[in-house]
Amino acid sequence: MTIAEPTLAHVHVHDVMHTGILTTDPGTPLRVVARLMAEQRVHAVAVADSDHGRRPWAFVSTLDIAAAAAHGDDQTAGDAATTEIVTVSSADRLNDAAQVMAGHSLTHLIVVDPATGHPTGILSALDVAAAYGD
């Protein structure tokens, strides 16, 4: 008896992604961002600069929050944001998106609409894990 290897080639990003993106301005106090993350039960918030069309340029992750808390730092979202933004198309295969995550050592990707290139949601490593476990 052979066991089939799990594959994500038949699953697309749009099948498992979360629509919408939580964003904040770079000047938002990190404690406010932490509260938002806890209330919304998310592990990352995109930092978008209102001077540049609200385009996300980095993430504040729970690890960034923990690092600031450990050092007692009173930072802003812009100060703490250390995770680069990488995008994938909602039409991409999930295994390709997982390779992008692994290749960049990221836990979150911005999902863009293939027709417009505009951000439409977030793909997290937990979304990939859930699909892989099914």
Image: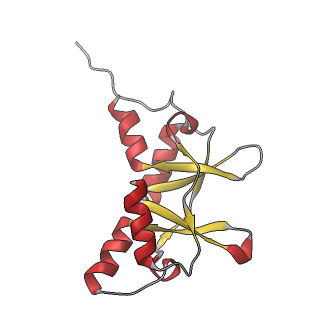
Above or below, 1 against 40 in this view is above
Residue at figure coordinates x 47%, y 48% from the top left: 99
Q: In which quadrant of the rendered image does the C terminus lie?
A: top left
Q: Residue 76 at x, y = what percent?
A: 48, 82
Q: Position of residue 87 (x, y in %)?
A: 60, 55
Q: Which residue is at the front of the view, 15 or 35?
A: 35
The N terminus lies in quadrant: top left
* x 43%, y 55%: residue: 40
Q: How many marks?
A: 0
Viewer-nearest residue: 130 or 35: 35
Task: Answer yes or no: is residue 12 visible.
Answer: yes
The image shows residue 131 at horizontal and vertical percentages of: 40, 34
Hey, which quadrant is residue 33 in on the image? bottom left
Foreground: 82 or 6?
A: 82
71 vs 3: above or below: below
Is 98 situated above or below 131? below
Q: Is the residue 44 above or below the residue 125 in the image? A: below
Q: Residue at x 47, y 56 (%)?
A: 108
Q: Quadrant of residue 32?
A: bottom left
Residue beneath the point at 40% across and 58% down: 39
Q: Answer with left or right where residue 113 lies relative to residue 16.
A: right
